[in-house]
Amino acid sequence: MAEYNTMRTTAAGARTAQIDEGLRTHMNKVYSTMSIGMLLTFAVAWAVGTSPELLAVFRDPATLQPNILGWIVMFAPLIMVFAFGAAINRLSVAGAQTFFYVFAAVMGLSLSWIFVAFTGFSIAQVFLVTSIAFAGLSLWGYTTKKDLSGWGTFLLMGVIGLVVASIVNIFLGSPAIMFAISILGVLIFAGLTAYDTQSIKNEYIEHARHGDSEWLGKSAIMGALRLYLDFINMFMFLLQLFGNRE
């Protein structure tokens, strides 16, 4: 009996070590995929935003108001997020990754105007601040013993409120409303960074126990998308608050 218990303990320990190693690999995949997406987004945004001819395809060069194509590009990432969630079960891992990179490129088109509206130095400065904040929040979400699952509903309601308020303010153009939205946006997406990191970690552990390899491959890309959106939104709200305009 003692030998049997020892064997069970050894097997359980080996299984735990295997899951821990897989988790590290999984998180590295999440962060590396997200990082490539970020680089692609900012490369496209810079290429279009620093070219008056390309930017004019989407926006008025003088006022930066979007034309019809600009409005399509502005809302395309939101539509693609919902489409991605609906189609993920029918996509292969390679297909899901390709979709994510296409999404990142389209997001770059929608953000290209910032290179005209803000100074290059302030964009770089806010990007650095966002990177440091994101890294700290994500690390905390990964290592904390506190259960953050209760934050989900509250944060989702906050995101919906931000989307509605942002759309309304497109037509109102109120600086006061934009300031309030930006402050709330930073707080909400800071919370989402920690929440999503813990959620990605816990989902991996749960599915790894069942050996669901197909799901694990796709979930790394979905996790990258979630953290990518947290970073981009936190960056944009911080840029609205602290960016120096041209």
Image: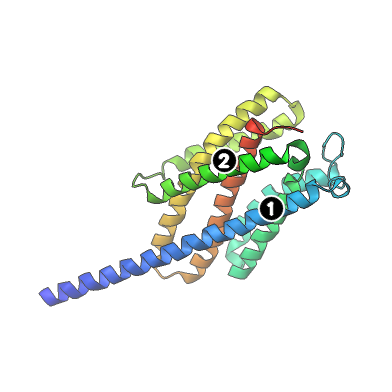
Please identify the residue farthest to the front as the structure is shown: 121
- Distance Cα–Cα, label 2 vs label 1: 18 Å
Work out whether 186 lies above or below 207: above
- The quadrant where residue 20 appears: bottom left
Residue type at numbered disc 2: Val
Residue type at numbered disc 1: Thr
Residue ID for mark 1:
41
Name the secondary structure under disc 2.
Answer: helix
Q: Is residue 62 visible?
A: yes
Residue drawn at x 51%, y 40% as measured from the top left: 190
Q: Residues within 10 Å of mark 2 (few under 14, many from 20)?
A: some
The spot of residue 129 in percent (x, y) is 57, 40
Left or right of 143 on screen, residue 153: right
Residue drawn at x 56%, y 56% as measured from the top left: 224
- The quadrant where residue 167 appears: top right
The spot of residue 134 in percent (x, y) is 52, 45
Please identify the residue farthest to the left as the structure is shown: 1
Left or right of 29 on screen, residue 96: right
Q: Looking at the image, do the residues carrying marks 2 and 1 touch, with CB atoms under 8 Å apart?
A: no
In depth, the one of 165 and 103 nearer the eye is: 103
Q: Earlier in the sequence, mark 2 or mark 1?
A: 1
Residue ID for mark 2:
129
The spot of residue 8 in percent (x, y) is 21, 72
